[in-house]
Structure formats: C-alpha cells, structure tokens
Image (tube, rainbow, N blue to C red):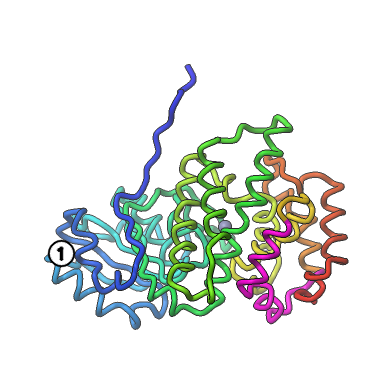
Amino acid sequence: MIEVTHKISIPSILEVGKGNIGNLGQLIKKGMFKKIAIYFGEGIYELFGEIIEKSVREAGIEISNVAAVTNIDFQEVAVKAFEIPNDVEALIGVGGGKAIDVVKYMSFLRKLPFISIPTSTSNDGFSSAGASLTLNGRRMSIPAKTPYGIIVDIDVIKGAPEKFIYSGVGDLVSNITAIYDWKFEEDNNKTTVDDFAVMISKKAVNSFVRTEFKSIRDDLFLKELVDSLTMNGIAMEIAGNSSPASGSEHLISHALDKFLENPELHGVQVGIATYIMANVQQHRVSRITKILSSTGFFDYVSTLKMKKSDFKKAVEMAKDIKPNRYTYIHIDKNIELAKKIIDENEILSKILI
Ligand SMILES: [Zn+2]
C-alpha cells in the first residue's frame, strides 16, 4: 500500500524577534523542562553566556552543565552525548553552524528535545534535520532530527559580521535553482517532487526577495531571512531529503569544500553557484542578479578573490558529489556551458579572479 499522506515533525517553539536571548527562560517554559544543558559555539559564551544563564535560572529551570563546542568530529560528538547526565531533559545549542550541528546530533542520539539558537544566519542548518559533522576529517551531512525549538534574537543576528548575512542570502536564493533542478529531475523520470515541499521552498524565497529594505541589517529584512531559512528546514523535512533547498548549486559548493584549503562560508559559495546555474538554466536570472546586487552580495564576494579556475574545477566535479541525482549539472553539455559562463559572464568576471 502506498501511504497517501505523510507525517512530519515541526518545531513546537518558534520565536523570531528582538530581545529573545535575554528572555530565553520564559520562551522555553512551554517545554516544562526541569533541567537542561547549554552548549555554546566558540567565543559565544563570552557574549551571551551570562544573560542566558540568568534568564534560564530566573524561569526556575536548573542548568546541569554549560560547555563550549569546538570539535565537530562525529565520534567525539557521540562520546560527549553519552556523558550527558540522565536527568537532563533538553539540550540547547547557541552559536553559529558548528554548535548547532553538534548539539542537534547529541540530542538525536540521546532522544532529547533540541533547542536551536543561531547567533548568525549563515545557512538553513539551524532549522533543518541534518547535522553537518566530520567523519575521518571529511565533512558529511548526517541525518539527525528537526529542532524542538528555534529561537532567534534579531538584535544578535544584526550584530553578527555581514559575511554571515550574505551567506544566509546565498543559501536562500539557491532555492530558485534547486527547485528548477528538482523539477528537471522529475521531467526526466528520475524522481518525484513533493508538491508541498516545492510550494514552501518557493514561498520562502519569493517572500524574501520581494521584501523592501534600505540596509541588510533592517529588522524586517533579517526577520524575513530567518523566517525563510526556517521554512527551508521544514521543506526538507516534508520532502525527506534536501532537494527542495539544494540542487546543482549546492553540489558545486560541496565540490569546492573538497579541494579548497580554506573554503568560504557555505552560503557564499552557494550564492555564486546559484548565479552560475541560473544562467545555465536560463531561469530567473534577472531576479537572482537583482537580489545579489542590491544586497551587496556581489560586492562582498569581490573582496574574497575567489578564482574562476576553482569554480570551473568544481563544476566538473559536481555531478560526482551526488551521482544518484540528475540536476542540470549532471548533463555534459551544461558542464561546458557553466564553464563558458564562468569565463565570459560580465558579473563573474568582476567578482572572481
Ligand atoms: Zn545550504
């Protein structure tokens, strides 16, 4: 029998707004936790540790332990997870990508609710079910679980370096090329798209690109960015895979991660690859150009001195990253076209060396 509907998990707590860090204790009261453990990314405790601990204690919740997250090695994370005392009822991860990934995975192993508190919006990992950890030194995406709670303080996001905002923009804009790839895959009888996941992914990016803003640090712009990245996590949960928010452009970024000594932020690489693939697909190029220009994304990229030759190499490697998929970049003539675009496109010639 084929199931006609499917069940998904979505966060029970979703709070995106100003001042949330200082109000954390109240915001997690819904969970009725008696004792929790809190993990901070590197340098994050120094910024928000005291205010978070105070707020949690004032809400009558005991803190079992507070620790810093530095290592994202799969085995180390597993060992740490089983050192957590048995009376801890929830795990809180505060920080950038690494802290979120590590605590997400520990909570999955211990079957505990995970509360995700990103301090920057560099990608959609804070809302997704997958954890990006290293196995034998290689970064991999490992299935974990959707967060029980997502709490974002707009003032904290606003204070993060602009590169994290640009990375979030790039990761979100990639929905456009990813959905086009997914449909292409379906048109070629290689998969079946999930209509609901497509709708959420499209709504997420469209609502964001239509938001008017003066600066990328506008409250509304940041709230839209966070909400839309959150919707990405849900779209992937519905699909049961990353296809609604990850297509050929993500494969190019994953390829760069494989050979660059110092890869740039995930969403930064993905954003450039999105622009390349939109030109290959000939789909919504002007919309993507507009958002990446008006936000200052392209200007930021031009300061990084990323190489055209690296992108051409990544384009060639991309299809082997996920040989089971069938995106635009899995077609030989599109690989050649992408390389030609990297060589000749006016914007890419300005921002890459
Ligand atoms: Zn991504």
Which quadrant is the C terminus positioned in? bottom right
Give the x, y percent position of residue 45. Answer: 33, 78
Q: Does 309 lie within the magenta span? A: no
* x 29%, y 60%: residue: 91
Give the x, y percent position of residue 127. Answer: 43, 55
Query: Compared to 246, does 195 lie above or below?
Result: above
Q: Nearer the viewer, residue 144 or 326?
A: 326
Give the x, y percent position of residue 130. Answer: 48, 51
Under circle 1, the secondary element is loop
Secondary structure mainly formed by the magenta segment: helix
Q: Quadrant of residue 342?
A: bottom right
Give the x, y percent position of residue 88. Answer: 21, 58
* x 68%, y 73%: residue: 298
Question: Which amino acid, by three-letter code, is at mark 1?
Answer: Ile
Q: Which range of residues does the magenta coloring cover? A: 285-308
Q: Which residue is mark 1?
A: 61
On screen, residue 272 versus residue 124, left or right, reads right
Q: Does 301 lie within the magenta span? A: yes
